[in-house]
Every structure is written in C-alpha cells, then in structure tokens.
Image: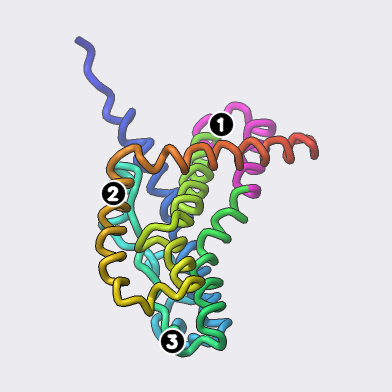
Amino acid sequence: MPGIDPLQSVIPALMRLVGAIVAFTMHEWAHAMTAYRLGDFTQREQGRLSLNPMRHLHWQGLLLVAVFGFGWARPVRLSPELLRNRRRDTVLVSLAGSAINLLMCPILLALVRISVIGMPEAAWLHEVLLTVYIVTLSIGVFNLLPLPPLDGFRALSAITGWEESPNYGRILQIGSIITLVCMVTPAASYVVTPVMEGITQALLRALAAVGL
C-alpha cells in the first residue's frame, strides 16, 4: 500500500488558514469600524479599528478552521448604549461583517479568473485565491443565519426586541446548541451551500459579461 503524502492534507489546511485570516480580519474590522462610526468609540480603545489580524483572530478558532473547516474569531464587544440609534445601529453593526465579506467576493473571484487566464501555469495561485474566496463567502453567508451567537441572530434580536424578553436567556441557550450542531454536522450546508452556489453562479455570469 503506497504511503500517504502528508502535503495532501497540510496544504489545503494552510490555504484555509490564509482564507480565514483574511476573512475574519475584515469581518471583525467591519463590525468595529461600523460601531465606531455610529458612536461606539470604545472600539478605538480596544484596538479593533486596526487591520492587523492579531487584533481580531482567536487562535483556537483559527486552528479549527484549518483542521475542520469551521471556527471563529474574537468577537467585537459592542457598547449599544453609546450608539446614536440603539436598535437601528445594532442591526447595522451586526450585518457589517457579512456585508464586507460578501463585497469582497466579486473581487476575489475576479482575481481567480484573472490568475487562470493570465497565469495558467500557476495552479497553486489559483487554488489559494479560490480557497480564500470560498472561506470568505462561507463566513459571510453562515453568519447571516438567525442562530445565536451569529450576526443574523443579533440583527433579528435588535429588530424584534427579543433582548428585552424574559425568555431571552433560554432562547440563547437553545439556539447556541442548535448552532453547535449545525457547525459539527452537515445540517447548515443544506442552507448555506445552495446560497453560496447561487451567489457564485451570479458572480461568474457577471464576470463573463465583462470578459473574465
């Protein structure tokens, strides 16, 4: 039986790591910058307005992305009482992370196409860029799910006023268990994957229309 080349598993893990560093840094920076612009000036004191990945990454969560394909970053600590319009601005801050991830996707996919057309021999570059695109898109879409502690749930809670409900703690407990199950099983893929495929197909059509 031939030996297994360890690079076959190490290289994809390293590429996921690169993707997670890029996507998580931009995701958390967007949360912090949006909060800062809307009145939460504690983000500067916490050092979260920097694009330095060290300010945003959670190393255990990053390692899990490399090994298992899912993980987390250091969440931005929001001070809602400092926001100009607490309910509206909480929604905007909550959605900012996924918004910037999704806005990055056309650029990343365009870079993939440009690298394939312009440097067809650089297969490693195609793979790295494609992995960064996939990780960025998956983080953006997954975080929009209305499950605690994801951003989609935070936005929904602000819209509905659930945070003021006496059952809010119970909702968080049950929802967090559901989220954990979604992360360690294929359950979330039934929603996330079709959305990712739809976005990718739409972007590919748009790029084809401009010659990429």
Residue at the outermost right position: 210
Residue at horizontal 72%, vertical 35%? 205
In the displayed structure, does residue 186 sit left or right of residue 110?
left
15 drawn magenta: no
**Which class describes the residues within 10 Å of circle 3: few (<14), some (14-19), or many (20+)?**
some
- Helix, strand or loop at disc 1? loop
Q: Which residue lies furthest to the top in this view?
A: 1
Picture residue at 75% right of the left edge, 34% below the top: 208
Q: Nearer the viewer, residue 124 or 90?
A: 90
Q: What stretch is highlighted in magenta?
A: 106-125
Q: What separation in Å lies between label 1 and label 3 (alpha carbons)?
A: 44 Å
The x, y position of residue 210, in whole percent, is 80, 39
Q: Of marks 2 and 3, which one's residue comes earlier in the chain?
A: 3
Q: What residue type is labelled 1?
A: Ala
Q: Where is residue 117 in the image (x, y as percent from the top left)?
A: 68, 31
Q: Looking at the picture, tell me which residue is in the foreground, 31 or 81.
A: 81
Q: What element carries label 3?
A: helix
Q: Quadrant of residue 115?
A: top right
